[in-house]
Image: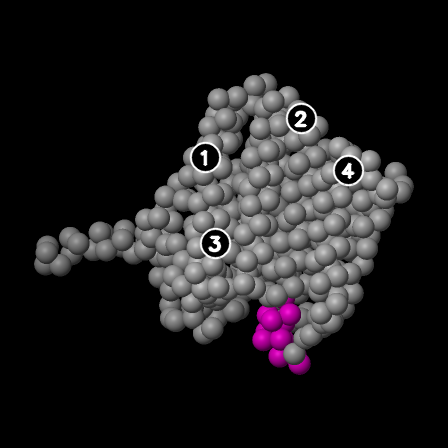
Amino acid sequence: MLNISEPAPVRQANSFFNSTFELAFRPYFLLASASSVIALSLWLLVLSGYVSFSTTGLSAVNWHIHEMLFGYGAAIAVGFILTAVQTWTGQASISGKPLAALVLIWCLIRLAIWLNTSTTVQVAIGLQSLWWLSAIICYGRLVFISKNKRNYLFVPLLTLLGLANVAMLWADISDNTDIALHIGRSAVLLFTILMSIVGGRVIPFFTVRGANTAPITTKPVLEWGLLFSSIIAVTSFISSPFIQLPYTPGTLMILVASLHLIRLSFWRTTATFAVSLLWSLHIAYLLMAIGLLLLGVSYFTTAISFSAALHLITIGGLGLMTLAMMSRVSLGHTGRALDTRKIVNWAFISMIAAAISRAVLIYWLSPVTAWTLSALLWLIATLIFLIVYWPILTSPRQQKLPY
């Protein structure tokens, strides 16, 4: 009996490790969500005056931007892409101990950034460079070996995000705070391109399957026009502080936003209202487009705040889209039915409310009140995700994937 019962804890531990590090989406969805809870909680303490940052590390605003974009957003993106590449190429993606090592590097980066001294930020720069390089190599190796040309574009996009990440850190600790802030804002626009590419592929596909609609198609000229104009708009914004442009980036942002809205009109949004895993994605895409539109308009009037519009993109677009994608991928890639618990619907609603609070209520409430309310709503949404999906993401897959 002892021989039978004693190995049980070892098998459970192995099962936990094997399950959690089966594919990249599992640890990164969990840890990135948890890190956003910690980072936003610290940010609330900073806003309330209970905590102050080291004067030798990152400035407070850039610390906040970095952790939400690169601590949270980039980890979710890399976790998703390193998982999806296995489906796209038919090749085994990173898993097990190599994946655990990559996750450990990410965790050490978080520790270094949270300690936030000049020395630890420099360490974070080195580790962040290693993390991005490793992730890009893991992804690039699979798509190039399989000659999966359709997905080559994620290599330069991830590379640009990695360069922006490192450049932002280096600029800030070199006392170029304004440049670091500009790089962070530029990274938000790079994320809109990533959301446009991924969303443009999966949202129509998920809609057809989940809402049982007729096939969704859009004109190739719209797709290529959107990608091309997005690249020009982001390039213009990045270069605008350094060179004199014959036009304002705001005009291009309005054009890109208009193309996003036209694209969305083909996606049969009204057919998704009964399926939360669908309407959440559609609303996220809509909020991203509206955020880009308001961002462009802010160049022509002081009535629209650039920061408020940017947060409509980061919270309403990136925040809600990642939450919805994590919820769906976590079910589908663990062999579970694509049915969310009702409390997850409240997580989606809470994230939408967080976006509205930060981007809209800011005009009626005091800034600190609106910021605090928005952060609390994000925390509620993310904590719901962690409570519901922790056991799912750390337990064995139930069956083979249906696709």
Image location (x, y in percent) of residue 69: 60, 42
Residue named by callout 2: 177
Residue 218: percent from the left, percent from the top? 72, 72
* N-term-proximal mark, 2 vs 3: 3
Position of the N terminus by quadrant = bottom left
| Residue labelled with disc 4 | 240
Figure check: 18 above or below 298: below
Nearest to N terminus: mark 3 or mark 1: 1
Q: Is 171 situated above or below 231?
A: above
Label 1 neighbour load within 10 Å: few <14, some 14-19, many 20+: some
Q: Identify residue type, mark 4.
A: Ser
Looking at the rendered image, the disc whose residue lies closer to the viewer, 4 or 1, is 4
Q: Which mark is residue 140?
A: 3
Residue toward you, 357 or 137: 137
Query: Along the polypeptide, which appears first: circle 1 or circle 2?
Result: 1
Q: Residue at x 88, y 38 (%)?
A: 302
